[in-house]
């Protein structure tokens, strides 16, 4: 019982390892059998995988949007910096160097 209690601390928090707790363990077992949770294991894993893939794709799309916005802002700043007269023929320019990797681990195309 000690190893079971160690593995499932929340479920057995009100039970101890003594024989007097046997009815509690039987009730827990009956509840697990009635719920038939193992039957839903593969369905849960497939659902979880689908959700994770969808969330990663959404996150990737949002990152791309933010990267494009940053590139646009840097271009706007650079256009303004050209108009500032520092020294004849010289101006300041911000450079964005991004190294993204694709899913295959190869470097992807630059943002702009």
Image (cartoon, helix red, strand yellow):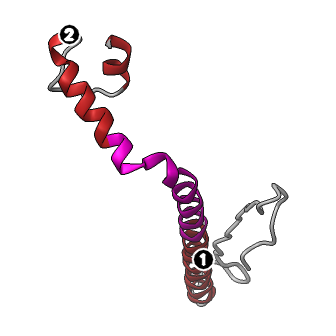
Question: In this rendering, which labeled residue sits more in front, label 2 or label 1?
Answer: 2
Q: CA distance from mark 2 to mark 1?
A: 57 Å
Q: Indicate the position of residue 24 as horizontal and vertical percent values.
A: 19, 27
Q: Quadrant for residue 59, please give it.
A: bottom right
Q: Nearer the viewer, residue 59 or 51?
A: 51
Question: Of marks 2 and 1, which one's residue comes earlier in the chain?
Answer: 2
Q: Which residues are magenta?
A: 32-55
Question: Viewed as shown, does residue 10 lie left or right of 79?
Answer: left
Question: Viewed as shown, does residue 36 lie left or right of 78?
Answer: left
Residue 73 in sight in this render: yes
Picture disc at residue 19: 2
Q: Indicate the position of residue 5 as horizontal and vertical percent values.
A: 30, 20
Are dots 2 and 1 in contact, CB under 8 Å? no
To which residue does mark 1 refer? 61
Q: Nearer the viewer, residue 80 or 21?
A: 21
Which quadrant of the figure contains the C terminus? bottom right
Would you place residue 12 above or below residue 35 in this image?
A: above
Which quadrant of the figure contains the N terminus? top left
Would you place residue 36 above or below residue 15 in this image?
A: below
């Amino acid at each position: 019982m000690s190893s079971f209690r160690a593995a499932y601390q929340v479920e057995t928090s009100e039970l101890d390892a003594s024989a007097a707790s046997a009815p509690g363990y039987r009730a827990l077992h009956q509840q697990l059998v009635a719920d038939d949770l193992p039957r839903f294991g593969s369905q849960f894993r497939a659902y979880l995988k689908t959700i994770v893939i969808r969330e990663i794709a959404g996150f990737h799309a949002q990152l791309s949007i933010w990267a494009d916005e940053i590139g646009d802002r840097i271009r706007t700043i650079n256009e303004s910096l050209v108009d500032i007269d520092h020294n004849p023929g010289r101006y300041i320019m911000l450079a964005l160097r991004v190294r993204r990797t694709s899913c295959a681990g190869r470097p992807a195309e630059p943002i702009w």
